[in-house]
Image: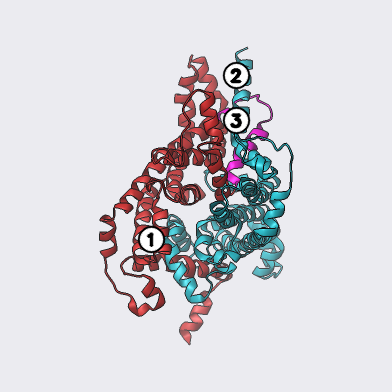
Chain colours: A cyan, B red
Amino acid sequence: MRNALQKISTTGLLIAASFIAVFPLLWMVSMSFMPEAEANAFPARLFPHDPTLANYADLFAHQRMGRFLFNSLLVASLATVLSLAFNVTAGYAFAKLDFRGREKLFRFLLAVVVIPGQLTMLPLFFQLKTLGLLNSYAGVVVPFMTSLFGIFLVRQYALGLPDEMLQAARVDGASEWMIFRKIVLPNLSPIIVTLAVFTFLAAWNDFLWPLIVLSDDHNYTLPLAIASLSQEHIQDSGMVMACATVTIAPVILLFLALQRHYVRGLLAGSVKG
Amino acid sequence: MTTLRAFMREISPGHVFVAPAMFVLSVFFLMPVLGALVMSFTDFDLYALADLKNLRFIWLGNYINLMQTPLFWKAFGNTCYFALVGAPLSIAVSLAMAMLLNVPGVGLKALYRTALFAPYVATLAAAAVIWRYMLDAQYGWLNQFLIVIGLQPIDWLGNPHFSMPAIILFSVWKNFGYNMLILLAALQRIPDDLYEAARVDGAGGWERFIHVTLPGVAPSLWMVALLTVAGYFQLFAEPYVMTQGGPAQSTVSLLYFMYEDGFKWWNLGHASATAFILFAVLMGLSFLRPKSEEVFA
């Protein structure tokens, strides 16, 4: 009896909390389909009486939404590919290849992990200006290329690869690069997916650094686009909500599709054992 | 020649594998960190940005100047308010939700867990825009709710007393899911026998929470607390999107102050000093942290 009561009250609380968690997101989607009059109606409405795609049409036709979506996709994909290229090789080497200075270097990385990225932003801005990379996709992607979190994540996973497997390939005369390509990469694929999802989401959602690097709004990513749209068009709530939906929906869908991999990374980064 | 040959002999495949990452890290992370330190000792501004010849070293000048800038202290105070009130609230909600998800025999848990985690995945800038409407003084759902339960509506983002609480409310909603998953994993590692034993000894729900649950999650809770406080000290996009630092500068955070100082007024040296002070705070916090080696090993 006590148990049944506990189950019912827990379920009730979980339903209420889940509702609060997703309500703003559902309202965003609902409002994005409202014609202007309904979106601005008082009191606020939950559902459109007369759903329309006008807000989306307006966004893509007059607010360059297609361009921003393209920018975001490009920046996040580029960040993901580069991050994988740099961090998977390094993470694997720290786990499985013996080289002089490895322990020292790794301890050094563990020490600098506490330095916040924001500290580098002002000099990095000047550096990119010198390199002519301001206002470019490359400039936005630079901080994502190496990630200490990524190196630690891959190393942690690669430690579990059996040494005999690598040794056998060496005895057969395979080069280290061959071993990496043919044996290591396939075996690391779960953690590669994890790192890819993390990087893609982080690059897609990033705000401060793109805001600093991108001065021409033609190159804006979606978070910058919605921030500026909401400042100029806060009354056009339907259109702003459509813009928010275009920004948020891709990452939510990506998360839903790859949830298992994402949660693995989240737990590996913060929990011992 | 011999030294070069000796050097080449030392190079192993491992070096080649880590070299690209270490190169990028040095050029785009470590160099800027040193650069920030140097810049914070200079009067780096728009003129120096145009021509480095205009750069002068003023050593602690920026730091002394900051100490005498009221807006810096305002930003520091606002950031502490946000971090020291917001982080404990977030963690309390995370722990409560994790405990609910850990109750045995409740169905559809995966569904609830995904729903509760969704705000964390949502793009921060876009979510902040949605919340501007949620918190709207007239139309907002939050005020509709206050009216229904018989309270006065609040001008959340327009009143300097409520702007920071509004941002904290938003941040709790946005962030609790992350720590919830970490704490849920910690809760699941607590053996059921411990709860059974406590029950046999006649411990009630609250006593079991104090004597079994809390000690069980304590290491994770400590880590989560430090990481969350450190993260909350880096407040930026929320005030940028929701309040532009206002009203009456009540939501200007350290990073917001640094951003405007550096990239709006081009006082890059001055702004670097702010960045270093933020860094010092985060360093101080990291000393309270369990060794990262233990975390990742």
Range covered by the magenta-colored residues: B99-122
Task: From the viewer's side, name the closer residue of B152 and B56.
Answer: B152
| Amino acid marked by disc 1 | Asp
Which numbered dot is residue B101?
A: 3
- Residue A141 lies left or right of residue B49; in this view the side is right
> Disc 2 vs disc 3: Cβ atoms closer than 8 Å?
no
Q: Residue furthest bottom?
A: B1
| Amino acid marked by disc 2 | Gln
Task: Select label 3 or label 1 by which is in front.
Answer: 1
- Secondary element under disc 3, as helix, strand or loop, is helix
Residue B97: image x %, image y %? 55, 31
Cα–Cα gap, marks 1 and 2: 54 Å
Residue under the image location 35 percent in, 70 percent down = B44
Indicate the quadrant where residue B268 lies.
bottom left
Task: From the viewer's side, name the closer residue of B138 and A161.
Answer: B138
- Tags 2 and 3 both on a single chain: no
* Mark 2, residue position: A6
> Disc 1 vs disc 2: Cβ atoms closer than 8 Å?
no
Q: Chain of mark 3?
A: B
